[in-house]
Structure formats: C-alpha cells, structure tokens
Image (tube, helix red, strand yellow):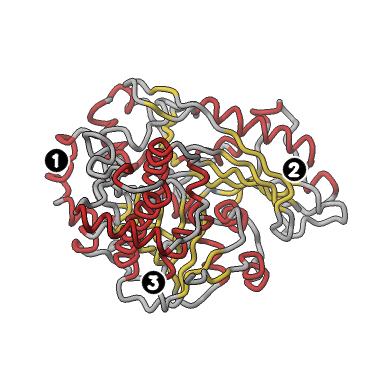
Amino acid sequence: MLTAVFDIGKTNKKFILFDEELSVVDSRSVQFDEVVDDDGDPCEDLDGLVAWITGLVEDVVAERGGVGASGGAPGSASGGGSGSAGLLGRINFSTYGASLVHLDEGGKPVTPLYNYLKPYPEELLDTFHKAYGPADDFAAATGSPTWGMLNSGLQLYWLKHQKPELFDRIRHSLHLPQYCSYLLTGHAHDEPTSLGCHTAMWDYGRGDYHRWLGAESVSHLVPVRVQSTEVFPLAMSGLMGPGSAPSGILVGAGAHDSSAALYPYLKAFDEPFVFISTGTWIVTMNPFGDAQLSAADVRDGALCYMTPSLKPVKSVRMFLGHEHDHQSARIASAFDVNPGQLSSLPLDDASLAQARAQVRDTGIEYTPSVHLASGESVGGERGSGWDPLQFASAEVAYHALVDALVNLQLEALGAATGSTPVRRMFIDGGFAGNKLFLTLLARAVHPIKLATTELSQATAMGAALLVQEHVDPGHLKALLNTRVVPLR
C-alpha cells in the first residue's frame, strides 16, 4: 500500500509517495508566486495551491487506483489483497503553521490566506493583553510568545475587530494542514500539532482551549479536535464527478510540519534528545522538557509546540535559515562568487581564526537583518553594522557569518534544553548538509553528540507515519541512519 504526502512549505510545495517500507517511490515539487491579500500585502496563492493538490490527487488516484479497487480491505495496514502493494491507500498533509483558512457556510474561503509575517496592529495587541493578561504571562500559559499574525488565534481576534463584515461570514476556521485534509474529505476539524503551533489558543496549564476564545465568542469557529492519527474516507465526488470516488483510500487529519518532522524520532528513540529542524526557520525542539513555560522562558525566546499526544514540546524558533540565505547572498555579491559555493565550504581553521580576529579587532558585532524570533524586519539597512567587505575573502566572511549563526543557535539550544539530561541532538533539513555549520555546532555542544540523518524527507515521513497503523521502531532507526558529526 502506498502513502502520499503533501509537504507544503512557504517556498517549496512537495508531493512524496512512500511504499510500505517508507521508501520514496515518487517525488514532485512546485513553487508558486505570491499574490496579494485584500490589504495589498503578499500572501499565499491559495487558489493555485488548491488546484495543484486536487489535480495531483486526481492524477495519482487515476494512476494508482485505490486499495478497495483490487479487493484489499479498506483501512487495513497492509492493504489486503496481493495486488495492493502498488496501490494508493493513504494521503496526509504536513504544512507550515500559523495560517488559517476561514470558510463560509458553503465551505468556501472567506478571506485570502493571510501571510503570518503580515504586520499586526500594536494597539490591537495592547487591547488584547489588557483584557487577557500581560504578554509574558499570557505567552507562558499558551506557549505562544506574542507575535501578532504568527499567533493564528490572534488572526481571528484581528478579523473580529478589524474586518467584522468578513468575520461575520466565517463558519469554520481551519489551520492550513486541516484545510488541505478538508479539501479531500469534507470533514472540518482541529488537530493537536497545528493547535500547538504558537496559536495562542491552547492553555497548557488547563489542558484546554484558552478562556479568551469563549469570551470573544470565537470558540464556535474552531471545529472539533481530533487525534493526529485520525483518518477519514476520501470524498472525491467534488473533484472528479459524482460516483467516481474510489473506496479504500483514507486521508489523514494533517499535521504541522516541524512537529511532523519530530515524529519519526519520537517513535524511534526513548532517551531524551533535542531535535533541530532546519529550513527557513531553525526550530530547536525538546520533547522531554518542562511541561509549563515560565515568564523567564518566554523572555529567553522559548515557546511550546505539541505532540500528537497533547504533550508540550519546549522549543525555540529562529529565522536563521532566512538570515543565512540573505547574508550569504550579500557575501556572494560582494566577492562575485556563487552562494552555493559558500554553503558547501568545509571548516578551515585558518579562515575561522582570521574571521574571529577580524571581528575582535573591529569590535563590530554581527547584526541580524531581521528579528530572529518573529521574522520581522528590524528596520534600516538589512544587516547594517556587518559588512562582508570588512573581511579579506568570501571564505573568511562566510566563516564569520556561520560562526555568528552557530552562536545564536547555541542560545536557542540553551533555552530549549534547560536542565534536561540530553546526550544526543539530531539535526535535519538544509543545515544538515552544511559542513561548516555542523562542525562548529558539534564542537560547541561536545560531549553531547550531534547527529545527522540520511533521511531526506523527515517531515513527509512523519506525516506518513501518522496514518500508519503499525510502526516498527527498529525499522525507523534503520531508515533514519543517524551519523555523529565529526569534530574536524
């Protein structure tokens, strides 16, 4: 039986098809240009995304059929009959978080898919916190630092108070992974990993939705919460015409991408570890930490995600992937080299020593171009105070950049790990292929072992595992094939 996963990032949208052994048998990707929302701000092309998802489902269902089509038992883990191994049995979604699709009575989107980096009115935040508690206390309770649109629950509050004519038309507000599931099933639901993605909706102390949802009369817009492992029958009639829905194919509830990437490690390893998911954001996740954040944790940049079992995951997220790409492009432009050439550089101790000496002698501290916790621009010239041309070469400048980024990552590790007795750290995503970043980080955390994995699709695999009935930890460990990063 095959499992299809749509892994939808801000930039890249991927479709991955796994076989029963969780090996990739097909992979496709696409990118969409941004459009603008009703305020003229950039946002996701929701129509294009929907057309891509539904079109691919039509194609794959037509090509692969359904488990039930060959006599397999619908919903069975193995797919039933002898001819079922190459047939599609499951579909699931992993997407970026902090994004809601608001549906009207007929199930159509009421608003654009607002960008989580869209500015949030400061006066509205002040009004919210006057009603529901100081920002640090509220963030500690909900595991959600106050980030405006990055707190998807506050998008609902914003709509109610800023766009009441649109708000009044909403009947369901679905996080993006659950909206994708809704497209194929018609079932509106909420789900733990999306709910736990700094939404400001969940009160970790109470183990329930925060009281503000009821006080603001928005709780009825949040649909029933289901388990992350829940599956629903594929309902394709709206896509392929009446009577054409194949039997036996089940669709998952959808999951937040960073939480999905963590899931294979949680299923494979029992001892405490820290997981570092890297991409545009670097998300440092400690699923073995304290259950409740303090105000001090929040000031250190910590937040909580949530496992499928509703357990908090103490985490720190930083916009380091974006920062790396932006500053690498500045270095490449200054020295007329290819940015890809920089990211493949190994550690050169002489270049590192020269970079550190230059920083020490000039006294110029590295200045990120954005607020790393929220992704918002810090204003002024991006990266002001840090000029690549102060260094002798592109190699030295890049060593200085990565050295600074590693130091920032160490701060995130300290905040996320706390007193948890961690012996291993796992890193996946884009930075897992950056030799310089890995070596510097491995040296800094020694004697804790930093390990990479050959698994290239951890997020998609996590989403696939969520809709599998049986998971073999030994097989997962073999698939992960973790390798300790050498110190040289």
Between marks 2 and 3 in the image, the one whose residue lies nearer the viewer: 3
Q: Amino acid at mark 2?
A: Ser
Name the disc covering residue 247, or none: 2
Q: Residue at x 12, y 44 (%)?
A: 130
- Precedes in sequence: disc 1 or disc 2: 1
Element carrying mark 3: helix
Relative image position of residue 283 (x, y in whole percent): 40, 55
Between marks 1 and 2 in the image, the one whose residue lies nearer the viewer: 1
Q: Amino acid at mark 3?
A: Val
Question: Looking at this view, is 215 or 162 the one in front?
Answer: 162
**Quadrant in which residue 456 is drawn:** bottom right
Element carrying mark 1: helix
Q: Which residue is mark 3?
A: 445
Task: Tell me: 363 left or right of 96.
Answer: left
Residue count near mark 2 (Cα–Cα under 10 Å), binned few <14, some 14–19, many ≥20:
many
Work out whether 37 lies above or below 403. above
Q: Which residue is mark 1?
A: 126
Question: Looking at this view, is 390 or 182 the one in front?
Answer: 390
Q: Residue at x 24, y 54 (%)?
A: 139
Relative image position of residue 417 (x, y in whole percent): 34, 69
